[in-house]
Amino acid sequence: MNSTGFAASASASAPVPAPVPAAAPALPRAERVRAFVRLGRPKFLVQSMMVVGLGVSMSVHDGHAFRPGWFVLTLAFAWCTHLMTHYCNEYFDLDADRANAAPTGWTGGSRVLVSGLLRPMVSLSAAFVLLFVSLGLIAVMPTTGTRVMAAAIAALSWFYTAPPLRLNYHALGEVACALVLYGLGPLLACALQSGSVTGADVVYAGVVCALQFLRMSVMNLADIEGDRRTGKHTLAVALDGPGLVRLYIAGQVAVGAGMLVLAGTGVVPAAGAVAVLATAPVAAWVSRRLLTGALRRPEKANAVTFLASMHMPVTACAITLSLLGSALNTDRGVPGGWLAAYGVTLTAFLVWLTGAVRSNVLRRPA
C-alpha cells in the first residue's frame, strides 16, 4: 500500500460484492414506504436547501427585495431535481452498487435495491415522476434565462448516470454534479429573486462549485473498487487513489489562495474570504485522513465521507452569513421576511447537523 493507503488495483483479499437478490420480498405497506423514502436519500437535501439560501442571500445583498413565492418555487425545484437524481442513480448505478463491498452512509447508494427491498423499476418510475414535476416548475419560471438555467440543471442531473451520456461513467460526473448543485443552483436562486446576477455572485458560486467538485472526487474515491469492477470510469478511477488525493489537497489550497487574492484585489469583500477560510479546518481534517488511508478502513471511512460532504453546506452557510451581515450594515438592511425564512432554514440545518455529527463522527464504532 502506498503513502495514501490506496492500492493500484483490488487485492485478492478484497471483500466479496453483495449478491443479487432473487426478488423483492413482500413487505408490509409501512415498510415499503420507509424503504422508498430511504431509496431517495433525503438527508442530502440539506445541501440543496443551503444552496437556495445562499442564492437568495446573494440577491438580498445586491439590494433586491425578498420574493417569498420565488423562494418556495426555487426550493421545490431544487428538492425535486435532487431527489430525481437520487432515484435515477439508484436504478442506473445498481450494478456498481452491488459491486461495492464497502459502502458508507454517504456513498455506495441507499442499499435498498441492492438488498432487494424494492424492485428497481420503482426507483426509475419515481425518477420520471420527479422529472416531470421539475419540468412543470421550469415552465412557470419568469424569464428565458432562468428557464434555460433550470433546464440545464435538470438535464445534467438526469444524465449524471442515465444513458446515453452517463456522465459519471466517463469521468465527467464530478464536474456535472458541481455545476448542477453549487454552480448553477445558487445563481438560479439569485436570478429568480432579482432577475440578474453580479460578478461577485458568480465568484461565490464558483468557489462553492469548485469545492463541490473536490468533494465529489472524494465520494467517488470511496467507491473506487466497485466502480473498477463494473467499468465505471470516474475521475477517481482515472487518477487512481494517490492522484485523486493530491488533486483534493491542491484544490483546497488553490481555492483558499484564490479567495485571498480576490479579497485583496477588491473583487469580493474580505468578509467573504474569511467565511470561506473559516471552513478550511474541515477540509484539512479530510485531507489528513485521506493521506493516512482512512477510506480503506471501514471504521474511519464513514466519518471522512460525511465531513467531506458537510464541508459544502457549511461553506455555503458561512458565505450566506457574511453576506447578510454585510447587508445589515448598510442603510437598506435585510428584508425581515428573509431574515425569518433563513433563520428557520439555518436552525433546521444546525439541528440536523448536530445529530448527524454525533452519529457519523462522535459515535464510537461497534
Image (cartoon, rainbow, N blue to C red):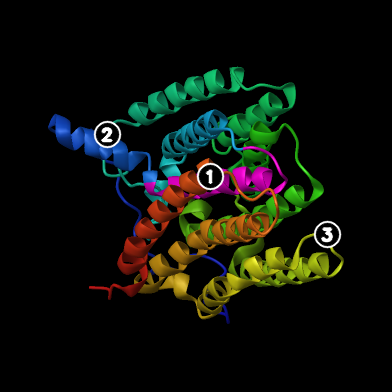
Q: Position of residue 92 (x, y in %)?
A: 47, 36
Q: Position of residue 258 (x, y in %)?
A: 78, 67
Nearer to us in this view, 362 or 260: 260
Going by the numbered disc 2, the residue's amino acid type is Leu
| Region in magenta | 43-65
Task: Please tell me which residue is depicted at 62% across the width and 34% down the height of the picture.
Answer: 153
From the viewer's perspective, is residue 146 above or below residue 102?
A: above
Marks 1 and 2 sit apart, C-alpha to C-alpha, by: 45 Å
- Disc 1 target residue: 336
Residue 155 among magenta residues: no
Q: Position of residue 64 (x, y in %)?
A: 69, 39
From the viewer's perspective, is residue 229 above or below residue 10?
A: above
Badge count = 3
Residue 118's disc is 2
Classify 10 Å Cα crowding around label 3: few (below 14), some (14-19), many (20 and above).
few
Outermost residue toward the front in this view: 331
Going by the numbered disc 3, the residue's amino acid type is Val
Classify 10 Å Cα crowding around label 1: few (below 14), some (14-19), many (20 and above).
few
Task: Please tell me which residue is depicted at 58% across the width and 82% down the height of the picture.
Answer: 3
- Disc 3 target residue: 267
Going by the numbered disc 1, the residue's amino acid type is Gly
